[in-house]
Amino acid sequence: MYPLLAGLRIVDITTIVLGPFATQILADLGAEVIKIETIEGDMNRAVPPQGAPGIGPTFANNNRNKRSLSVDLKHEDGKELLRRIIKTSDALVHNMRQQALDRLGFGWEEVHALNPKLIYCAALGYGSDGPYAGKPAYDDIIQAASGLAGLNRMRDGEPAYHATVTADKVAALCTVYAVLAALLHRERTGGQGQLVEMPMFEAMAGFSLNEHLMGATFADNAKTGYHRALSRNRKPYKTADGWVAVLPYTAVQWSRVLKVVGREDVTAAPWFNDNAERSKKSDELYAILASSLGTRTSKEWLVIFEGEDVPCGPINDTDELLDDPHLAAVGFFDTMFTEPTPVRRTLRQPVLYRGMTREADRFAPQLGADTRTLMTELGYSDADMKRMTAARIVNGPEPAS
């Protein structure tokens, strides 16, 4: 991790991927992130295969560099413990339904009264001002509602989900910049906290519509959809032994591609050198590529296209990324933990901060691993901890006898 956010304390009341991915980025940047878990723990702990008891791969890849406090927030003593942490923190991030957190007594008004300087970031399914407010939201539901799955229907006739939790991860990145922007504003304007809402639906609607808003940007009755991106022939191209990605964009690049596939005649068309007109012919041009690359192997085509300075690359499966020479050279999977762990590979933050030393990471915590330490820091006695542990108000290492 990098110590850029050292000195900041984040209360992390999140589960599954969206919230934990966001707060892990903050932890990777040096913030102290206290993960608040139920007595049973984050559901993602159980996802197999288990690298250590209670730590599956998805949990490990979204919860490193955090401290774990396992507490029953339905009990008054558990609520008091969280209140003490909130009073000492800079931000709170949650992805619960807001109504549920409000019922527990940790809505914006209550938390703001406890700590007026705290940034309260709610990663919601839908913005609270709209008719969908409070509806449950999961990745597939948001991919469907936001138009992302529908883009496939516009192209192929059937909707399809991305084979990754796109909505969760895009919303997580939005959550990170929302928290950082609010913290920066607080520091510049006298230290007042604020409520920040980061709704998944709106985040993904913007993500889906960015290049697809098209004519609807300027006219009420215009259709959405960027024709080049929706071309059925914009796809990985079949070669003699696999597939390749090729994306000629300029007239020069298309001229070179058409020459090497034997279709130089197309460059004589009156529309070819006009960027706008050529863009309208994208589907036809992609169809030429789709029908032309079966005569050589993927390696042969990549050598040819690289020699012509045409954007191209291999079609990698996720398994192949594990041995990718570039990722190996930049140390993308390198582990650097403070203690021995079962992790063979980790996914470091992609951003490098040149001139700043990267510090060792802490492995994702066992459930309640930091409960006792945190309670001691907050002034609880051994007797308090024994009582609350026996009553299952908290879960963690037993206090010394």
Image (cartoon, rainbow, N blue to C red):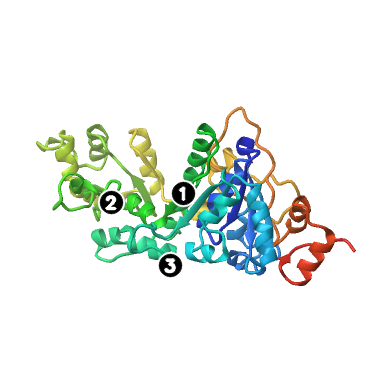
Identity of the residue furthest to the right in this view: 401
Looking at the image, is 220 positioned above or below residue 99? above
Residue 262: % across, % down: 22, 42
Q: Is residue 333 visible?
A: no
Task: Indicate left or right for 116 with 168 as reference.
Answer: right
Specify whether residue 229 is in view: yes
- Residue 234, disc: 2
Find numbered disc 1 in the image and state the secondary structure of the residue it sits on: strand
Cα gap from disc 3 to disc 2, whole angstroms = 34 Å
Disc nearer the start of the sequence (2/1): 1
* Residue 311 image position (x, y, % from top left): 35, 38
Q: In percent of the image, x 58 and y 64: which residue is there?
A: 44
Q: Amino acid at mark 3?
A: Pro
Q: Indicate which disc residue 196 carries.
A: 1
Q: Position of residue 69 (x, y in %)?
A: 69, 58
Residue 31's spot in the image, x, y percent? 62, 43
The foreground one among 54 and 324 is: 54
Per the image, label 3 sits on a secondary structure element best described as loop
Amino acid tagged 2: Arg
Left/right of residue 5 with respect to residue 150 in the rendered view? right
The residue under label 1 is which amino acid type?
A: Val
